[in-house]
């Protein structure tokens, strides 16, 4: 199972939108895909997938349900592992609890790909989960606060986990050119101040139809297959399927047996 992590320094940039649509696009290609709602405190992937969630990871932690019990088969071909909307307890798990989550998820045997939608920010919860992913997408918007927070996130990941294999993914951009230019700028800063090159995936353009897709509970890749978001998510999926699987070098991984 290949694990794709999605995070951002600043909140509200588009992580859940990318995570859900990427998962659905990969499922449309015939792959068995699960989406871990790793925004454990304020989950909303279930809304975009129009999935009815009865139990969440809070029930697993409480010992009343197993991971298999809480998984929801969404109507869009993606299995959802729900976080817990509005639970402060889940937004601050200990490392041991997070390891338990990673271990349980890595034992899913009917899954080719797992997409992990994390919360924003640099709390230990977020960075620990993200660091365990094989492919690490750091989302950024072309605005000063998002750029500053993405740089801070990269710095923390590098410092705490010695991670350098992070792929910058500019979102809500006007063009692929703009996306490349944002990457160029930040890569310049990380090279100069951290001595590290920052990887790149692809840009995700602004799409005016996203709200309509959310309203209808149909992922944009299915509702507007030729829209900006769909085109760019397809390029991202192509890229992710072509890259070699390299397991996380963070010391903790979703595939501990293979280390
Ligand atoms: N490519 C895009 N074009 C236009 N609007 C977008 C795009 N991506 C996301 N949005 C809008 O931005 C808002 C936030 O998106 P989303 O919930 O995906 O962000 P998030 O990073 O997951 O937020 P949070 O940090 O709260 O989890 C939503 O209203 C969404 O419709
Ligand atoms: Mg989100």
Image (cartoon, helix red, strand yellow):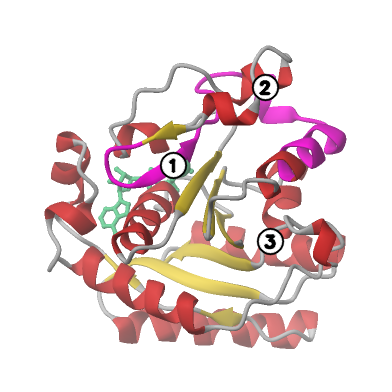
- Residue 147 in sight: no
Using a 10 Å C-alpha cutoff, classify the residue at mark 1 as few (fewer than 14 neighbours), some (14 to 19) or many (20 or more).
many
Q: Give the foreground label among 3 and 2.
A: 2
Q: Which residue is mark 1?
A: 79
What segment carries the magenta color? 74-102
Quarter of the N terminus within the rendering: bottom right
Q: Which residue is mark 3?
A: 152
Q: Of the residues under marks 1 and 3, which one precedes in the sequence?
A: 1
Q: Of the residues under marks 1 and 2, which one precedes in the sequence?
A: 2
Work out whether residue 256 or residue 205 is closer to the camera in this orientation and state it: 256
Q: Which residue is mark 2?
A: 60
x, y percent for residue 220: 21, 53
The residue under the point 24% across, 48% down is 219
Work out whether residue 216 or residue 75 is closer to the camera in this orientation and state it: 75
Residue at disc 1, CB closer than 8 Å to ligand 2: no
Magenta stretch containing residue 185, yes or no? no
Q: Of the residues under marks 3 and 2, which one precedes in the sequence?
A: 2
């Amino acid at each position: 199972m290949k694990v794709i992590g999605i995070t951002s320094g600043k909140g509200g940039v588009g992580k859940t939108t990318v995570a859900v649509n990427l998962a659905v696009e990969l499922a449309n290609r015939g792959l068995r895909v699960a989406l871990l709602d790793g925004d454990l405190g304020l989950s909303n992937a279930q809304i975009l997938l129009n999935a009815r969630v009865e139990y969440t990871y809070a029930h697993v932690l409480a010992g009343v349900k197993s991971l298999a019990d809480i998984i929801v088969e969404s109507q869009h071909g993606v299995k959802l592992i729900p976080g817990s909307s509005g639970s402060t307890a889940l937004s601050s798990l200990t490392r041991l609890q997070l390891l338990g989550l990673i271990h349980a998820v890595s034992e899913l045997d009917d899954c080719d790909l797992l997409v992990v939608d994390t919360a924003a920010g640099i709390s230990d919860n977020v960075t620990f989960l993200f660091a365990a992913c094989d492919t690490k997408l750091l989302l950024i918007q072309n605005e000063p606060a998002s750029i500053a927070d993405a740089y801070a996130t990269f710095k923390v990941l590098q410092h705490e986990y010695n991670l350098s294999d992070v792929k910058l993914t500019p979102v809500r951009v006007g063009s692929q050119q703009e996306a490349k230019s944002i990457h160029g700028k930040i890569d310049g800063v990380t090279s100069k101040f951290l001595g590290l090159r920052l990887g790149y995936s692809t840009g995700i353009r602004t799409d005016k139809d996203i709200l309509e897709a959310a309203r209808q509970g149909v992922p944009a890749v299915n509702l507007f297959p030729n829209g900006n978001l769909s085109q760019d998510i397809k390029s991202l999926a192509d890229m992710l399927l072509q890259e070699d699987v390299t397991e996380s070098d963070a010391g903790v991984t979703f595939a501990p047996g293979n280390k």
